[in-house]
Image (spheres, rainbow, N blue to C red):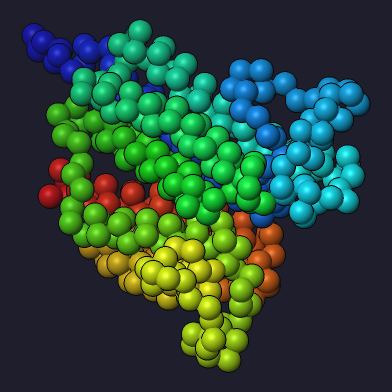
Amino acid sequence: MLQPSAAFLSPARPRAVARWLLAVAALIVAMVVVGGITRLTNSGLSITEWKPITGIVPPLNEAQWQAEFAQYKRIPEYRQINANMTLAGFQAIFFWEYLHRVLGRVIGLAFALPLLWFAMRRRIPQGYGWRLSALLALGGFQGAIGWWMVASGLSVRTDVSHVRLAVHLLTALTILAGIVWTALDLLTLHHDRSAPPARLRPVAIGALALLFAQLLYGALTAGLDAGYAFASWPLMGDALFPAGVPMADPAWRNAIDNPVVVQFIHRWFAFVAASALVWLAVRAWQSAPRTAMVVVALVGLQIVLGVATLLSGVQIDLAVAHQANAALLLIATVCAGHALGSDRAR
């Protein structure tokens, strides 16, 4: 009589763990969208304190709303920009920042509690516990980064630091990429209990690095409101690069702090990143043709949305769609890289 294999008898359930991770990934995409709306509506400084536990309860009566509004009135953004804001206007911006923070807590619980349950029931396959723990730790650190970002706009500035905003967004997207890659490894393991984790091939490393560089400049563009600098395409005004733009010293700071230069880089580096992503799709075609087609389609859509966002003067719905599509493009790129680096592809 055939004896059941050790893998068959194992309590590990890679498919169940993978499905949970993909659900968390969907929540992170929603978080990216809400974060984009929060930034575009200038809502990010409406809550001036960080209360990880008690902050889940919003103001519930007139006195509490007035107290929260009074806290907002103390910061430079209110005094210099929103001095005529009414309580109703404050409640509108408070909503998006509150939703953003609540969703962050939901994601934390949606990751931590099932992880604990899976670990206690020994459902996590051998070798994946450390990876999931690292993702949990990075998620907790992301909360601290979020407050670090908000704190930059509470005393001197009238907005948050664009550099800290970029760190906050890229950390979220790194977590998203790590979760999706791990879920794909687990789904492969479900179909073949002897399958090793996929490896990052050089072409995937290059494509992801260039995509993250473009995402960095997208975050800097948002943080500096650089999208408002020129609402024309392909020229910036009547030139490829406008004349007479004030430049910072030292020169390297312009690539980070100068809104015109940042918009210029974000415009044209997009095509460098797009070329790398298309090449990754070509290389992944044999292993995952559908995924490759999705990558190419999302690249094209991302460029169209980017141009439309510029031409519209950063219309909120287009800008949010542009940011949401960036998250979906990252997921598709991870899927293509994973397909290329899987044991079956090799």
Q: Is residue 172 left or right of residue 184?
A: right
Indicate whether 96 appears above or below 215.
above
Q: Nearer the viewer, residue 261 or 299?
A: 261
Indicate whether 311 appears above or below 21.
below
Indicate whether 328 appears above or below 147.
below
Q: Residue furthest bottom?
A: 238
Q: Quadrant of residue 187?
A: top left
Asked if residue 35 can be seen in this view, the reply is: no
Q: Nearer the viewer, residue 83 or 265?
A: 83
Q: Residue at x 76, y 44 (%)?
A: 93
Image coords of residue 75 (percent x, y):
72, 42
Image coords of residue 333 (percent x, y):
35, 54
Q: Residue at x 21, y 20 (%)?
A: 126
Q: Is residue 89 left or right of residue 137?
A: right
Q: Residue at x 31, y 55 (%)?
A: 208
Q: Quadrant of residue 7?
A: top left
Q: Residue at x 26, y 23 (%)?
A: 130
Indicate whether 179 appears above or below 53.
below
Image coords of residue 217 (percent x, y):
45, 62
Image coords of residue 330 (percent x, y):
41, 52
Asked if residue 248 can be seen in this view, the reply is: yes
Q: Nearer the viewer, residue 246 or 112?
A: 246
Q: Quadrant of the image for the N terminus?
A: top left
Q: Quadrant of residue 124?
A: top left
